[in-house]
């Protein structure tokens, strides 16, 4: 959960990172949903 807060804190750069890594975006999304 602490890592999730860090992600939300830096949403702008995280969005840019996910746009260049769509597979990782899907992986993280699945991980968050299953938790």
Image (cartoon, rainbow, N blue to C red):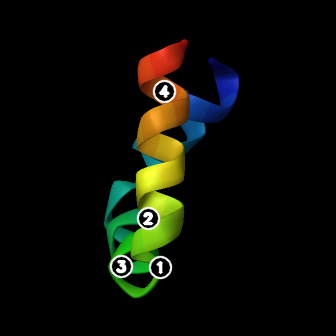
Q: Is residue 10 visible?
A: no
**Mark 3 crowd level (few <14, some 14–19, many ≥20, 10 Å Cα):** few
Residue drawn at the location 41% of the way across and 41% of the way down? 29
User: Would you name the residue on which mark 1 appears?
Assistant: 21
Name the quarter where the N terminus is drawn.
top right
Could you give the CA–CA distance between mark 4 and mark 3, rounded to whole angstroms?
19 Å
Decide: few, some or many residues near mark 4? Use Cα within 10 Å; few <14, some 14-19, many ≥20: few
**Which numbered disc flags the more N-terminal residue, 1 or 4?**
1
Q: Which residue sits at x=48%, y=69%?
A: 23
Badge 1 density bin: few <14, some 14–19, many ≥20, Cα 10 Å: few
Residue at mark 1 to residue at mark 4: CA–CA distance: 17 Å
SS at mark 2 in the image: helix
Marks 2 and 3 sit apart, C-alpha to C-alpha, by: 5 Å
User: Viewer-nearest of labels 4 and 3?
Assistant: 4
Q: Which residue is mark 4?
A: 32
Of pointers 1 and 3, the one earlier in the residue sequence:
3
Dots 2, 3 in contact, CB < 8 A: yes
Q: Are marks 4 and 3 in contact (CB under 8 Å)?
A: no
């Amino acid at each position: 959960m602490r890592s999730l807060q860090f992600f939300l804190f830096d949403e702008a750069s995280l969005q840019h990172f996910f746009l260049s890594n769509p597979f990782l975006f899907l992986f993280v999304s699945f991980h968050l949903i299953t938790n």
